[in-house]
Image (tube, rainbow, N blue to C red):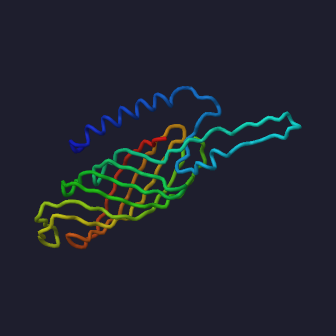
């Protein structure tokens, strides 16, 4: 069940993305903007072609390339959360989540850094398939007395190391990313334990 606190931001995000999709759905000139996630802006602005004066002194620039460095969206899984990703450079991204753990029913926040392998399997101008491998940490709350197969413990804080593996499909004409994530987690507090987590989601990238 989707947590109640996620409903208002989810509705707002859905309305915003719907409006943006309508804008992007309008007919575009052949040289209009395409989305390049994490692309260096300096190279984009200087990417021009020139002809010699003898050929008519014509100067023209390539199609402009938009960037989508910061993405915000929803994560459905463990935890149920708002998710964000920021591209530091072409193949390096940091990502974060803030939500509610389905297992512990408490607030949980997580952050990761990931190396992103670009343009996997398919070469297509409209989509990009990527694989991100990373590492990070998650913090959350517990109900005080926590019991599992290792016994009962009086703890109010969860600390877990995370190793996420994320498969993403990123659209080039519309700044959207759809992803599925598998996470190997090592709980350190309340006690050492191995966890397998995951989820699916989508992010909209702001240009």
The answer to whether residue 40 is left or right of residue 15 is right
In the rendering, at what x and y percent does residue 199 appear? 34, 52
Q: Which quadrant, please, contains the N terminus?
A: top left
How many callouts does the rendering have? 0
The answer to whether residue 89 is left or right of residue 8 is right
In the rendering, at what x and y percent does residue 200 appear? 36, 49
Q: Nearer the viewer, residue 52 or 23?
A: 52
Q: Which image quarter: residue 18?
A: top left
The answer to whether residue 53 is left or right of residue 20 is right
Q: Which image quarter: residue 162?
A: bottom left
- Extreme residue toward the right, this view: 54
Residue found 50% across the figure and 45% down from its top? 68
Residue found 54% across the figure and 37% down from its top? 173
Q: Nearer the viewer, residue 8 or 49?
A: 49
In the rendering, at what x and y percent does residue 19 appear? 42, 29
In the rendering, at what x and y percent does residue 185 appear? 32, 65
Q: Looking at the image, is 134 positioned above or below residue 71?
A: below
- Extreme residue toward the top, this view: 27
Residue found 83% across the figure and 35% down from its top? 57
The answer to whether residue 175 is left or right of residue 45 is left
Q: Looking at the image, is 29 positioned above or below residue 206?
A: above
Q: Which image quarter: residue 11?
A: top left
């Amino acid at each position: 069940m989707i947590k109640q606190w996620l409903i208002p931001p989810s509705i707002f995000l859905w309305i915003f993305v719907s409006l943006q999709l309508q804008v992007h759905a309008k007919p575009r000139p052949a040289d209009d903007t395409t989305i390049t996630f994490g692309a260096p802006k300096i190279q984009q602005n200087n990417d021009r072609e020139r002809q010699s004066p003898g050929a008519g002194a014509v100067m023209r620039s390539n199609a402009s390339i938009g960037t989508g460095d910061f993405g915000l969206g929803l994560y459905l899984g463990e935890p149920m959360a708002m998710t964000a990703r920021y591209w530091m450079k072409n193949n390096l991204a940091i990502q974060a989540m803030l939500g509610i753990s389905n297992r512990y029913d408490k607030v949980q926040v997580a952050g990761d850094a990931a190396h992103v392998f670009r343009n996997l399997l398919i070469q297509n101008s409209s989509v990009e398939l990527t694989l991100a491998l990373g590492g990070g940490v998650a913090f959350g709350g517990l109900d005080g007395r926590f019991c599992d197969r290792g016994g009962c413990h009086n703890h109010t804080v969860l600390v877990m190391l995370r190793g996420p593996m994320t498969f993403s499909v990123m659209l080039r004409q519309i700044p959207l990313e759809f992803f599925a994530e598998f996470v190997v987690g090592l709980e350190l507090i309340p006690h050492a334990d191995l966890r397998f987590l995951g989820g699916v989601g989508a992010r909209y990238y702001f240009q």
